[in-house]
Image (cartoon, helix red, strand yellow):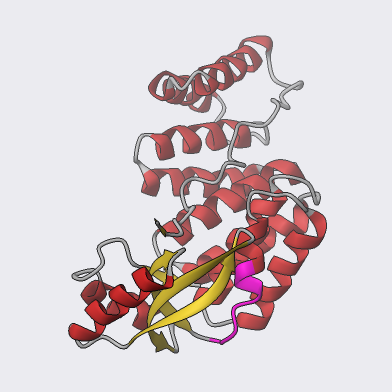
Amino acid sequence: MEHRRRAIFALPSMCLLLPIGCATLPDHARHRLLDGDRLYREKNYAAAEATANVFLREFPDRPESAEAYYLRALCRVQMGQRITAEGDLDRCLSLSRRDDLTARAHAALGGLAFDSGRFTDAITHFGAALERIEERPPADEIHYRYGVALQREGRWDEARKQFSALMHHFPGSRYEDDARRRFSWPIKGFSVQCGAFREAASADALVRKLRGASLEARRAAESRGGRPMHVVYVGSYASYAAADEALKRIKAQVSDAIVVP
């Protein structure tokens, strides 16, 4: 049976609306933010965005408005409006006086930058988030994504520090196994994984197919989830960009091949 590692990159799960910190606001404004929070949690994103819009027309630049910009950003991400969401998160950062809100806005911006391939920006935001957040979830996710971004920029030693911190502070985290695999990656470079099999014969068959297509395929014995597996790789690349470019050709043979680590 074949097993493939799947990427985990979507909107960071840490990006849920924070407890509303709006005690200095008028009652009607405080209740409006609370209504927006409720609508977001009910996944009524359009209504939550509209509620944030009303609040921000009345209070566009108060410190408490940072929470409304954060709320509207989350709604816009859910509705596929990522460019305007980034603008809202930047505005949130300019107004925020709360470390927890600032950290989560940086983490959200890091996630958006990562997903669009802007790894340098992602590194900046994830680093800023970790400076302000306690070592408890969702910090494990931030360490993980920060480490992956560092790897993709070729900053291997710095990446290992993030994976080490995750494994040390968050045993049992959903990211622990993949962090350990990335921490133990034996080279400072990338490859393309085409499959992972329990049976060596299945892996060898795929290697023959790939070599028949003039691809430099190889089989490696590894432990995955405590089980011995036979993993098929193609190539060795100095940069993530080079591996990603090679992936386009490899996908013609194996549609769900992925760049690793």
- Looking at the image, residue 144 sits to the left or right of residue 239; the answer is right
Q: Residue at (60%, 47%) from the top-left corner?
A: 105
> What x and y, as percent, mark residue 208?
26, 81
Q: Judge left or right: residue 63 versus residue 9.
A: right
Q: Position of residue 251 (x, y in %)?
A: 24, 69
**Image-quadrant location for residue 159:** bottom right
Q: Which residues are magenta?
A: 181-188
Q: Is residue 126 visible?
A: no
Q: Residue 60, how many percent across, how many down?
A: 54, 32
Compared to 1, does 148 lie above or below?
Answer: below
Does residue 18 appear in this view? Answer: yes
Q: On screen, 133 above or below 68?
A: below
Total number of numbered discs in the rendering:
0
Q: Quadrant of residue 33?
A: top right
From this view, report whether residue 7 is shown above or below residue 195.
Answer: above
Magenta run includes residue 40: no
Above or below — where is 43 with respect to 186? above
